[in-house]
Amino acid sequence: MFSKELYWFSWPVVKTYVGTMLKMDVKLHEKMPEGPKIIAANHPSTTDPFFVASIAHCQVFILISDLLFQVPVLGTYLRHSGHIPVKTGEGAVAIQSALDYLAAGKSIVIFPEGDLSPAEGRFHQAHTGVARLALMSGAPVIPVGIHLAFERIHSIRSTVKGRVEYGRWYLNGPYNMTVGRPLRFQGDVEDRGYVRRVAGSVMHHIIEMARQSEQRLRPGPAPINTLPAAR
């Protein structure tokens, strides 16, 4: 209950910030479906989770690195809002928490790359968590591609629990998102090869959406896909 109350308190704050500080350009290929869904996006900046959540028009629960839960004030907000910490080596716990939300009719946000995207519009391979969630829950995956003005990113150094970290904070400027059509997957979650292919398919849809976002921000020839080759 408290997470819902905190959401309704914080949502207008995020929407106001997005509306005043960002030049948000969002294109939807199709209206997001009602009910539980898995919103999957690339991750060029540390601030992406909040901006992606702002377009959902419903309460969403975000899978976020456990490190951010250790940041004073922000960590308290994330915990009380019900977001899902992702700890190194404990991915199964985060996946189960996300499955519980989906089973309860809630929606989640996940960044399949598992970390900030490489600099200047490149991409990591997707981890398999997004595929496992889709196959185990039956919920649709909504691919979201983000492109922003990389020269406006601020690299901010911080120390959390004695560990030095650098965040990429995007505080103002153009921020384009393209929301793709829902993707639905069925199959054996124990088939590792198939699970990797599903994750790869989701990532390629995200990349295509990001390219469309880039084309609206910087018209011209589309760059070559820079996703690393599969290992």
Image (cartoon, rainbow, N blue to C red):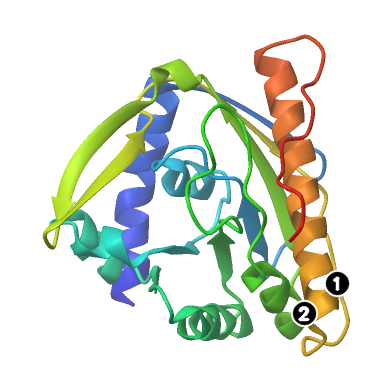
Label at residue 76: none
- Residue 229 in percent (x, y) is at 76, 50
Give the class, few, some or many, for how many residues have Cα within 10 Å of label 2's Cα (few <14, many ≥20): many
**Residue type at numbered disc 2:** Leu
Instruction: Tell me: residue 193, above or below residue 4.
Output: below
- Residue 144 in percent (x, y) is at 67, 45
> Where is residue 154, by image quadrant?
top left
Instruction: Tell me: residue 155, above or below residue 110.
Output: above
Whether residue 182 appears in this view of the structure is yes
Instruction: Tell me: residue 161, above or below residue 156.
Output: below
On the rendered structure, is 107 left or right of 60? right
Q: Residue at x 44, y 38 (%)?
A: 45
Q: Quadrant of the C terminus?
A: bottom right
Among the two numbered marks 2 and 1 on one chain, the one whose residue lies closer to the N terminus: 2
From the image, tell me which residue sits under label 2.
135
From the image, tell me which residue sits under label 1.
185
- Residue 19 in percent (x, y) is at 44, 26
- Residue 218 in percent (x, y) is at 67, 12
Give the class, few, some or many, for how many residues have Cα within 10 Å of label 1's Cα (few <14, many ≥20): some
- Residue nearest the observer in this picture, 230 or 176: 230
Instruction: Tell me: residue 60, above or below residue 191.
Output: above
**Residue type at numbered disc 1:** Phe
